[in-house]
Amino acid sequence: MNINARFAQLTRFDLTVLVTSMLLALAVGLSAVLGISDEPLRVAYLKLGTDNVYNVWIADPSNPASAQQVTFAPDGVFDFDVSPDGNFIIYAEQDFEAGASDLYMLNLRTNRITQVTNCRTQDADCTAPAIRPGGELVAYQRVALNRNLPTVGTGSIRIWIADLTTNPPQTYPLVDDDQIVGYGPRWSADGSRLAFYDNRNNGILVNQFGAPPDSAWAFIPSDFGEVGSLSPDGERMVYPEMLIDGSMTRAYLQMADLDAGVFSPLTDPNEDADDQATAWNPQGRFIAIGRVYRDERFTRGAQVYLVDTETGSIAPLIVDPRYANGFFRWDPDGNRLALQRFQQLDDAGQVYADGTTEIWTYDMESRRLVQIDTDARNPLWVP
């Protein structure tokens, strides 16, 4: 068989995998030339312990048995983020007695722990750390509890910043205007923009760091309540938009060009599907999405598909009707996904009653799924 005939038999998905693998090979070659570390990537995640609280564990995907616990919070960790260089994590440690959380930094090289915020002593609750690429700033959610002001009640969630270049870290609101509220902070991969959901105005607010005040903010109307995913260069954002379909609600994906202020569908709103979760590949062209078809391809839980932003084509990536898939993240090279899965059906297609959230990885080149751990959630890569 000649080369042209062999390529004619490739599916669009095969071509997608081939192109992505070639780009990965190029990245590996550049890493060797530039002297970039080739230490194996690891996966950090929250695991439920025998004490019924979550703490952070880290495992090598090639050896899941290597998993080790790295935080030991008595009341558990609510959520966390990993620095882009893999040197440290920021985690929200819960305090059940105080009814609030504070942020701490764990240096993964030295195991030294540094307190980042003093929220509990200030009658506030702080969670959802998001480390800016470069590692010098952390965006996070802060809510004033106002327990000494019963007539006032709990305040709105606002986005704050912690400056890790100061000792102790200086913390302050992202903006002084207390009417700007929101949750779910996310950075673009180049650190140029920070996005979060504004539940007061039903939309996504995007702040461009260093831009003049009159052009620093972009607002994306959206009723769905999710932040979505910024492109690596920070110029575009993909996000779910709500549709009311009879007595049911579902979502399709919109694309926002932040510089031009133009919004356009990424997935077809007329297609009988529900699209919600998104993860933008670091190479910039592809987006992994969580999709549930509502026609003859129906599954109980979301499956993972790959959207080509240049052609609009959608190819299946991880489809197993037994499992629901969510919370997926690309590795820095864009060749592997870490994802959270939940088994809903057994091999016979019957409801599976013993399912727990599980952590898996998926390799684009080998198309191999590897289970990392059970009773676990929220995986992130550790470079």
Image (cartoon, rainbow, N blue to C red):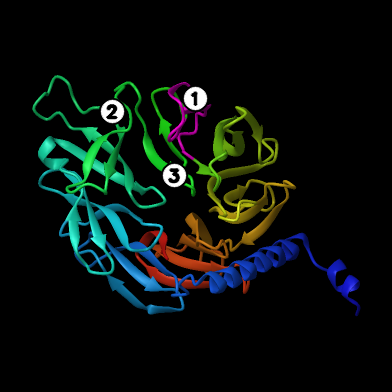
Pointer 3 with pointer 1, Cβ within 8 A: no
Question: In the rendered view, does 66 fall on the left or right side of 335?
Answer: left
Label 1 sits on residue: 215
The mark nearer the N terminus, 1 or 2, is 2
**First of labels 3, 1 by sequence position:** 3
Q: What is the spatial separation of the Cα atoms under label 3 and label 2, in whole angstroms? A: 21 Å
Q: Which residue is mark 2?
A: 156
Q: Please provide percent x and percent y for residue 37.
A: 45, 72
Residue shown at the point (57%, 32%) measured from the top left: 258
Number of residues whose C-alpha sits closer than 10 Å to that of mark 3, classed few (under 14), some (14–19) or many (20 or more): many
Label at residue 273: none
Q: Identify residue type, mark 1.
A: Ser
Q: Amino acid at mark 2?
A: Ser
The kind of secondary structure element at disc 1 is helix
Give the residues in magenta. Answer: 205-227
Residue drawn at x 24%, y 42% is 126
Quadrant of the drawing holding the C terminus: bottom left
Residue 287 higher or lower than 258, as above or below: below
Q: Which mark, by number, is residue 187?
A: 3
Residue 207 magenta: yes
Instruction: Choose between 72 and 358: the one closer to the eye.
Output: 72
**Element assignment for label 3:** strand
Q: Where is residue 43 drawn, in percent x and y?
A: 40, 67
Q: Is residue 276 magenta?
A: no
